[in-house]
Image: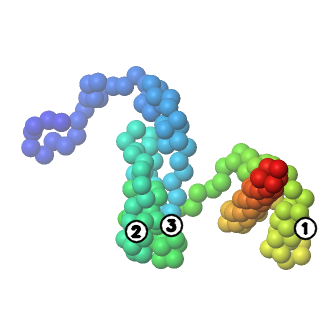
Amino acid sequence: MSSQRGNASRTRPQKHQNRSAFKNNLHDISNRTKLINSIQVSDVCMRCKEIIEWKIKYKKYKPLTQPKTCVKCGQKAVKKAYHVMCSECGKNLRCCTKCCQDKEIVQVEQPKDEQPRLDAELKALLQSLPERKRRTFLRYMNKKDKGEEPKIDAGEEDRKDLFDKLKSLKIEEDDDDLDFLDEEEEESGEDTDGS
């Protein structure tokens, strides 16, 4: 820029031009960088989304190490960096979780390659369950679908609910196995005491 008064336009290009674009994973191929690059910004307005994406692109993004306190509900429920409101409060108030303004919220689409991976993971979890737990889960799915065929490819909220149910069944199964082992140890311990 010239120092002349009122001269706001420059005729020459910038002196030092980059030969190649900046790559945030050029010299750093750690898991943290991969995780940051895979973040999909959601529950924010378009301007806030662009700000956070810029931080990710130019390696300025710093993820949270602990959850922050939500400005609306006061609970430690904010798990995304640069957000000040939890996603539940943002959905209830229909406002941006970063700037807290009532603007149009940008929704993130699930990547197409993510969907089959989640379906395969759900099927693998289902196959790892014993028959009794598997049938319990299928009855639960049928109840949710109101009598239709059990669907594996459901919405995101339904999928989370199904994963939670599967994990609870898996935990119950592990607890049952541990109880069974404890009973065997007690029985074997009684035999050694009586001898």
In the rendered image, is residue 45 in sight? no
Q: Closer to us: mark 3 or mark 2?
A: 2
> Up-down: is 165 above or below 14?
below
Classed neighbour count for the residue bearing mark 1: other residues with Cα under 10 Å, few (<14), some (14–19), many (≥20): few
Query: In the image, is 153 to the left or to the right of 50?
Result: right
* CA–CA distance in space, label 1 to label 2: 40 Å
In the picture of the structure, the residue carrying the numbered disc 2 is 70
- In three-dimensional space, the C-alpha distance between marks 1 and 3, rounded to whole angstroms, equals 32 Å
Q: In this view, does 144 lie above or below 108?
A: below
Residue pictured at 51% horizontal, 77% vertical = 92
Q: Which residue lies most toward the front here?
A: 195
Residue 55: x and y in percent read 40, 45
Label 1 vs 2, first from the N-terminus: 2
Mark 3 vs mark 2, CA separation in Å: 9 Å
Q: Mark 1 points at which residue?
A: 149
Question: Please, what secondary structure does the residue beneath circle 1 have?
Answer: loop
Across and down, in percent, residue 136 comes to 85, 67
Residue found at x 44% / y 40% = 57
Residue extending furthest toward the top: 19
- Residue 189: percent from the left, percent from the top? 77, 52
User: Three-letter amino acid code at disc 3?
Assistant: Ser
**Amino acid type at image mark 2:** Cys
The mark nearer the N terminus, 3 or 2, is 2
Q: Name the residue under label 3.
A: 87
Q: In this view, does 68 lie above or below 120?
A: below
* Relative side of 150 to 67, left or right: right
Q: Does any portion of residue 161 appear in the rendered image?
A: yes
- Going from N to C along the chain, the mark reached first, 1 or 3, is 3
Determine whether the residue tagged by mark 2 lies in a helix, strand or loop: loop
